Amino acid sequence: MIPSVLPTYNRAPLNFVKGEGAWLIEADGRRFLDLGAGIAVNALGHAHPDLVKALTDQANALWHVSNLYQIPQQQALADKLVEHSFADTVFFTNSGTESCELAVKMARKYFYDNGQPERVDIITFDGSFHGRSSAGIAAAGSEKMTKGFGPMLPGFVHLTFGDLDGVTDAITERTAAILIEPVQGEGGIRPVPDAELKALRQICDDHGLLLILDEVQCGVGRTGRLFAHEWAGITPDIMMVAKGIGGGFPLGAVLATEKAASGMTAGTHGSTYGGNPLGCAVGCAVIDRVADPAFLAEVNRKAGLLRQKLEGLVAAHPDIFEEVRGTGLMLGLKCKPANTDLVGAGYDNMVITVPAADNVIRLLPPLTLSDEDIAEALTRLDKAAVQVSKQLETA
Ligand SMILES: Cc1ncc(COP(=O)(O)O)c(C=O)c1O
């Protein structure tokens, strides 16, 4: 009999009932160190007092009105994002995949309104992940996500990750945009080198294309800058955001330049919930913290510390780990045995990591984790590695 919850997830037998900072408490009382942060969502950890206050104050005042009316919290969050980024304008969504939907629509509408309706194609890269909506799976294009869900939304051209020559060769009179994650998350923590992002920006400028960055996973402080592309010294035309911006409340956004957004006039797009008072009150509290240069400096310091310790872990377990990869607090450990074995041994040792493609385990901790948490993380990851080593020996 089909379970009452549609069985699309492989869930671990863990039942968390409470969160405190970087810690999750299981129903049986065990305390787990959370290096997954709900897949890069709980940017300020669990139950951060600023977020609890923002949410409860707003909950006591007003939950929802719809976008038929003015929403001051939405205006405030849009103003903050415009102040702290390349963007001139922001549309709020509830998730990353909804941000992908709008990014695709916005790019196509821009060319339609500018007399080039044939420009609909969007170049994407293998290993990418842009969500599970029809546009999201068509954009990523992997068999795993698309099989059985045809017909696919047309207009996506899939290239090999890192193949810059391929990009120039793939551009035709139908090309509208290039869509890329500055750091692939689901794809196995694969950062795009700064020089490559710069080159993609240049290619877009040379050919009159729009550059769309998917910062759903790597944005909002995760790499040590408010947005990951800042490291490369470039700006996109359109950017997708979600996850961390809501700190655990479902919230997403599309940020864009005035030019790229010029086709999105009244009535062209909408959302009942997107940008509602609760989500935006929390989003404001997140951005107030994360955009603070002192906060980002701390993220960078802790990222350096964690990375250095992980390099030691890899050196200590050459049978288990191949390398550390990633940037900021978006790190990956490439495993030799199955990555799921390591994730499972992590559960046994009460440390949470998240599997990704390319046999990687992801470390996406709350940006607020402490030095003590980092020390504890290494102790627990080391125990997990020893456990898997022993399992391999006895197998
Ligand atoms: C880079 C990226 N884009 C889009 C998405 C989709 O976001 P959501 O699951 O909120 O729809 C994700 C989710 O993991 C992601 O990592």
Image (tube, rainbow, N blue to C red):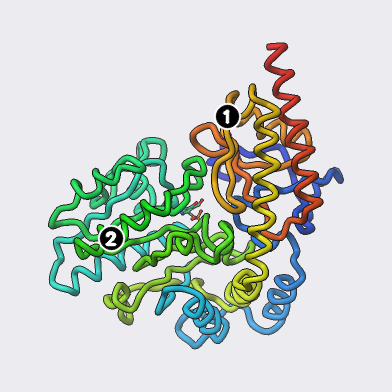
Cβ atoms under marks 2 and 1 closer than 8 Å: no
State which tag comes first along the sequence, 2 or 1: 2
Q: Quadrant of residue 2?
A: top right
Q: Which circle marks residue 322 in the picture?
A: 1
* Left or right placement of residue 115 versus residue 359 in this view: left
- Which quadrant holds the C terminus? top right
Find residue 23 and report its horizontal and vertical position in percent: 78, 52
Q: Nearer the viewer, residue 194 or 72?
A: 194
Give the spatial CA distance, label 2 vs label 1: 34 Å
Question: Mark 1 Cα within 10 Å, few/some/many (few <14, many 20+)?
Answer: some
On screen, residue 62 above or below 114: below
Question: Mark 2 Cα within 10 Å, few/some/many (few <14, many 20+)?
Answer: some
Three-letter amino acid code of the residue under disc 1: Glu
Q: Quadrant of residue 297?
A: bottom right
Find residue 349 and report its horizontal and vertical position in percent: 78, 35
Q: Nearer the viewer, residue 257 or 10?
A: 257
Q: Secondary structure at mark 2?
A: helix
Residue appearing at x 14%, y 67% in the figure: 116
**As drawn, which residue projects farthest toward the top?**
394
Residue appearing at x 75%, y 40% in the figure: 378
Q: Which circle marks residue 132 in the picture?
A: none
Q: Which residue is mark 2?
A: 202
